[in-house]
Amino acid sequence: MTPTTQNAPGPQITEPQLTQLVEKARDGNRLAFDQLIDRYQGDIYRMIYYRLRKQMDAEDLTQDVFIRAYRSIARLREPERFRSWLYTIAVNRVYDYLRKKRVRSIFKSSDEGPESHPEVDQLREKPEALEQVLKEDFWRQVARIAEKLSKMESEVFMLRFMDDLNIAEIAQVLKKSESTVKTHLYRALAKFKKEKGLRQFLQEDLT
């Protein structure tokens, strides 16, 4: 079981099918777990890449996330929460990475534009899931604004808008109440909405 990084969306799986796959994987079925990898590895890779902006490190961490998930899935009590459980593993791995690298936040302040990042240039040709966030000057704007956010505001914002988790899933990932998640999200939005360049990106229903 060695996941290879995919950037295209994984095959669509209905909720009942997902639950069945997780139950089978939890019972030791390797094929079922491989199907879960096919479905989620692109999402997890993007989630990690958004935070690190380093292609090789994102690929390594993505593989490690699925290795850890495979080793731990037998202890997952609620199969329907597999997605948020998987993101919890990924978030913790990112935190570990940042602590080891002594990175002060998930974004580095930089005056360099996206053209200075080879990884970003490569991703310009990837599927449409990345097209919106890889527009000109996007990373520079986000990096500047992220400095104004607390760690929790930044993480909640990323999980909601970059990773497309809903409020309940974010609460599960971060082990916070939904009301706490909403509070941090709206604080982050208030800061981001002051930036004209990001207003279109933020036009999304939060409910």
Image (tube, rainbow, N blue to C red):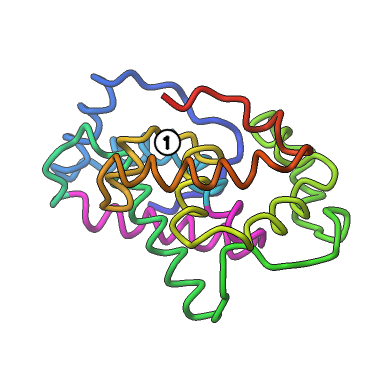
Instruction: Look at the image and tell me in which quarter the C terminus lies.
Output: top left
Above/below status of 22 relative to 61: above
Instruction: Let me know if residue 194 is in the magenta part.
Output: no
Q: Quadrant of residue 24?
A: top left
- Please tell me which residue lies in front, 124 or 33: 124
Q: Quadrant of residue 144?
A: bottom right
Residue at 72% x, 33% y is 132
Residue at 44% x, 38% y is 40
Q: Amino acid type of disc 1?
A: Leu
- Please tell me which residue lies in front, 66 or 138: 138
Residue 77, percent across and down? Answer: 11, 43
Residue at 53% x, 54% y is 48
Q: Start and end of the magenta stretch?
A: 48-73
Q: Is the magenta stretch mostly helix, strand or loop?
A: helix
Residue at 24% x, 37% y is 81
Residue 134, percent across and down? Answer: 75, 42
Instruction: Let me know if residue 49 is in the magenta part.
Output: yes
Residue 35, percent across and down? Answer: 37, 34
- Please tell me which residue lies in front, 159 or 152: 152
Question: Residue at label 1?
Answer: 165
